[in-house]
Amino acid sequence: MKNFIVSSRCYLKDLTPAQLIERGEHENEWGGYFILKGHERLIRMLLVVRRNYPIAIIRRSWKQRGALFSEKGILLRCVADDETSTNNVLHFVTDGTVKLMISYRRSLYFIPLCLILKCLLNVTDLYIFKRLIEGRESDTYLKSSVKTMLQAVHIEGINTHEDAKRYVGKTFRVKFSDKGGYITDEQICDALIQRSLAIHLKENVDKFNLLVFMTQKLFAFIQGKCCEEGADAIMMQEVLTGGSIYQQVLKDKLQGCLNNLRIVISKKVESGNCHSITQNDMATFCKRAGTVQRAMENFIGTGNAPSHSSSLPQEKGLSILAENINRMRYMSHFKSIHRGSFFVEMRTTEARQLLPDAWGFICPVHTPDGAPCGLLNHLSKECQVTGSPDPAMVDQIPEVLFSLGVLPLGTHIPNYYDVLLNGRVIGIVPSGSVLDVAKHLRLLKVEGIQIPNTTEIIHVPKKEFSCQYPGLFLFTGPCRLVRPVINLNLNKTELVGTFEQVYLDICLKLDEAYDGLTTHQELSQTSFLSNLACLIPMPDCNQSPRNMYQCQMGKQSMGTPVHTWEVQAETKLYRLLMPSSPLFRPAHYDTIELDDFPMGMNAIVAVISYTGYDMEDAMIINKSAYERGFGHGSILKSEFYDLTPGSYFERDPAKADLAQKLDEDGLPQPGSLIQENDPICCYFDDAASKYVVEKFHGKEIAYIDNVRLCCGLTADSARACITFRVPRNPTVGDKFASRAGQKGICSQLWAAEDLPFTESGMVPDVVFNPHGFPSRMTIAMMIELMAGKSAAVHGMVHDATPFRFSKDDSAIDYFGRLLEAAGYNYYGTEKMYSGVNGREMKAAIFYGVVYYQRLRHMVLDKWQVRSTGAVDTLTQQPIKGRRRGGGVRFGEMERDSLISHGASALVNDRLFECSDKYKTLICVGCNSLLSTALSRCPKSGVKKEVCRLCPNGGNVKSIEIPYIFRYLLIQLAAVNINIKVFT
């Protein structure tokens, strides 16, 4: 079984940074992933409905579940101690009754509420009636509905507790056929309740009390006394962590193996040849039943977990590859959270919306644009996912509640709140003392006394208008989102949850607090942002989409993903050879020590329209800066060469020319240049008794960066890992971006002597078009240009943390005064002289330092061109795919563009002449393409084109048509549809 890196079973656990470095790891190795076939695989986190809390929901699809079903109901996602989950729904039927939905083996069943209540407890109908209307004795609609439901049960002849259990057991006996006929109907009913109804509760009395609470909430919802809660708000959600997913998949695979083992043993016993089972027989049976290891490796490697009984919300996409393009990309995987594959195909946008209750938990900036927008989110930098609390501390919470004034169920008081702990109804608390109870609980929570410090305490107050259903709710379970804030009453840090935060008053700064109302304060003004969003310099001065773009482009930039280059064997790594530290950066940049993994370079930028090559987001790069290493990077690719047992690496002595490229051991020398079809290694194949030379198939010139002999797949086999370094200097078409989301391509490498220069003789590295500012509104980049310039002249680093400046104390004024102190213009402009004629430019040019990122999107990886080549055998059209030598895609937008310009000749050339042009025969008489054929004259033997349908052979001509049209005619003819073509 694959080990979880830095887990208790991993040999890297509890090692010091020095010991980690000795073992070839990073000094701050995080762990939290699996290694499978040399790749780091991560089980992704999913957002699911909050566990063990009844949620008022409106779903139109519920109307299709049965006659008279309404769209309103109470959803309860129950999660047991082993993380097994199931859904229960209390449906309101428009005839005034209630039905409970349970699921068993992925099938849904609907049971009348009073029938299931009678199965749970051996009590009278009067007791059930009083419990359901308790505290709501004046609600005539509720009373009449309960009476109707009780009468409906009696009409079916079900009068007692035993009658109800026998009725349910008899109905579900067919679903328990695997248990045989030796269990009674009552036992089937008990098993069904245990597995499918409120599985987080062990006692039937607790399940009874919870159903009573859900019923009262449902009728309050129907009557408009409480509002819809919905399942899309973050307060009604929790995280399905990688550990929970792994546990569920492992449990399912174990059950599958045990079922297979049972079937194998049963077949052996039924054959009559097995009088006793020996240890060897059992080993054979286990081998035939399959292993868990292979199934789990397949799950980690593919993310697929097909199952007939698992409670996972999806079966595909559960694991992802932890790409290490750069440090930002790598760290984002560990805080990414997905809504689920089901919502990707939904046309509605409710699941994608960022609601106010997500403040501080979900980053509003760090989400991709396009299809996964709003579904793939990232947690804020302070957000945490709770683990399992101390069971002993959780068990004593009811005693703590009773000591604080909570009363047991059955106590008759006129005005009270229900108290629930992890979905279990504990008791009631008088309305006058509920605030004091919540306050004392929060004190114990912050101090960590008697209750866990991750406990979520929610007091939902009663209102005169329709709002959330009131009560005092406590949650201590795992997988909840919490974040730290400052408790102003105790002046200590407190962890608050998503549901809890809605009913707290949290201020950003103390001067915004209200006396007697505000109870908490944020740790910082950037607590609501993710790690990547906190790395954007002054994002409060940018347009929102630009900040989103930077979060994505920052993860695509070349940089320093690892330090252990000599031991890395990744398929592909990007490396920026000459990175630098930004002069204008947020404080969070230093907090996470990102200077250890730099991913950009400081560039001197002139904001000027120069030469015309800087239009449409293009940028001009100084050729001298390029020659000094600006943006220089490389791609490292590793390939493995495995030998069969008995084979070994050695240079073929019969081929003297191999000595120029290979050493005597048959492997290349590190640092040597290699081109396409050059020998990369040579080995003696023991099976074929001859030497084999492997060739290099890359299209670019590369260098041998590293050669390593590794352990083979078997004890007597050899294996070599060869790492190639492909140099990638910036070329025209390569993509660059600033940290303000200003992305563009390199349009030209311009000679330094032809670029404009300042009075001091300084020439810019990058020429940026000023038209890029107004439409993008990236004021932060303009501020960075001034701040970077002042940092360079004063020899300092400026803080780019957002919300530091205001209207009275603006960033432009602060950095402008610093520039003035250094002798520069207050506004960051300079006089510049033309590099062509040396004359002074009339306009003042905005000039400064900006941190630029080189993205991994390069022309050499994407360019594609061909004149002729392979075509599809079926359609005779050019194949697709750059690797296969396919054609450039010509889609509908390109076609419409040419048509709108009236370029009909180009349309004909692209879609016909250079595509699937085909010469064929047509009969002008009957206008048929399919009836023509070549007929041989019996006398002369000359072939002649004739029509098989027309007399005397018809009038056959040759025409040119697209081959795909001929294919269409053949397909239509196969279903007896004839097409006539008029020429």
Image: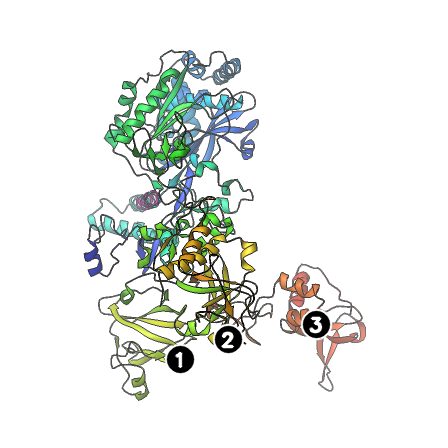
What amino acid is found at the position of numbered circle 1 in the picture?
Asn
The front one of 383 and 184 is 383
| Residues tagged 2 and 3 counted as in contact (Cβ below 8 A) | no
x and y percentages locating residue 982 in the rendered image: 78, 67
Q: Residues within 10 Å of mark 1 (few under 14, many from 20)?
A: few
- Mark 2 / mark 1, whichever is N-terminal: 1
The front one of 797 and 131 is 797
x and y percentages locating residue 772 in the rendered image: 54, 59
| Residue located beneath label 3 in the image | 905
Q: Nearer the viewer, mark 1 or mark 3?
A: 3
Look at the image and give the residue range highlighted in magenta. Answer: 244-261
Query: What is the quadrant of residue 488 in the picture?
Result: top left
What amino acid is found at the position of numbered circle 2 in the picture?
Asp
Residue at the location (39% across, 63% down)? 601
Query: What is the quadrant of residue 470 in the picture?
Result: top left
| Residues tagged 1 and 3 counted as in contact (Cβ below 8 A) | no
x and y percentages locating residue 699 in the rendered image: 43, 75
| Residue located beneath label 1 in the image | 677
Q: Which mark is residue 754?
A: 2
Query: What is the quadrant of residue 919 in the picture?
Result: bottom right
Label 1 to label 3: alpha-carbon separation: 41 Å
Label 2 to label 3: alpha-carbon separation: 41 Å
